[in-house]
Amino acid sequence: MIADMPMSIDDVLIRVDEIISGDSAALACEGDDAAAELLALGEAVLVQWLEAGGSEPTLKKVEGFRLLALHRQGTRGNPSFNACRETCREVVYHYNVILHDPAASETPHRIRIGAMVVRHLALFVAGKLQEAGLGDFCCSSRPVRQVEQHNHIVETL
């Protein structure tokens, strides 16, 4: 799975949707691999952000995780990117919870929730790439919604 890691944000979104809709029995068997894949998917999203800004993504780690180092790198010169800090930390949290007891009966649920968090991160970054002013609060920030509302109003006229 990780060897086939998607590199585009669209690919990440497709993969997390597959994980979320996956069979619980299959997810229960994935444990360690699923945790590592969720972390890798989050990293792929931040790599897209950094490369779009012309930066070379770091290989360093912060608190033992490259995802957190990539986030730190992504905030340089763009303080609004800090809005996804807790989302990145939550991806790490789900990684740790899944690895703590991969055979737990809650593992399929934990994997799905972790995938939803990665989806949130991917949508935030996609929005930031689309709209430079997005991100002061969340991926549901006003500029993208206004464009969608405007397009809907125009279509109905």
Image: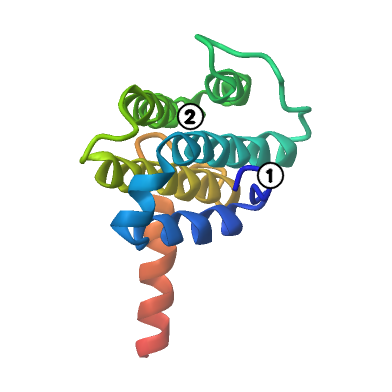
Q: Callout 2: helix, strand or loop?
A: helix
Q: Residue placed at 62% from the left, 43% from the top?
A: 2
* Residue for point 58% across, 59% down: 10
Q: Which one is earlier in the sequence, the residue at label 2 or at label 1?
A: 1
- Compared to 29, does 65 lie above or below? above
Crowdedness near tag 1: few (<14), some (14–19) or many (≥20) residues, C-alpha within 10 Å: few
Q: Which of 55 and 134 is in front in this view?
A: 55
Q: Name the residue under label 2.
A: 80
Q: Does residue 106 appear to the left or right of 63 in the view shown? A: left
Q: In this view, does 26 lie to the left or right of 12?
A: left
Q: Can you identify the residue that label 1 sits on?
A: 3
* Tag of residue 59: none
* CB within 8 Å, label 2 to label 1: no
Question: Measuring 63% from the left and 20% from the top, which residue is drawn there?
Answer: 73
The vertical placement of 107 against 150, above or below, is above
Residue at x 50% of width, y 9% of height: 63
Q: What element carries label 1?
A: loop
In front of the other: label 2 or label 1? Answer: 1
Q: Residue furthest left?
A: 105
Residue 71 horizontal/vertical position (percent): 55, 24
Amino acid marked by disc 1: Ala
Residue 83 position, x and y percent, is 41, 30
Q: Measured from the top left, where is residue 36 in percent x and y?
A: 51, 34
Cα gap from disc 2 to disc 1, whole angstroms? 32 Å
Rendered view: 123 above or below 66: below
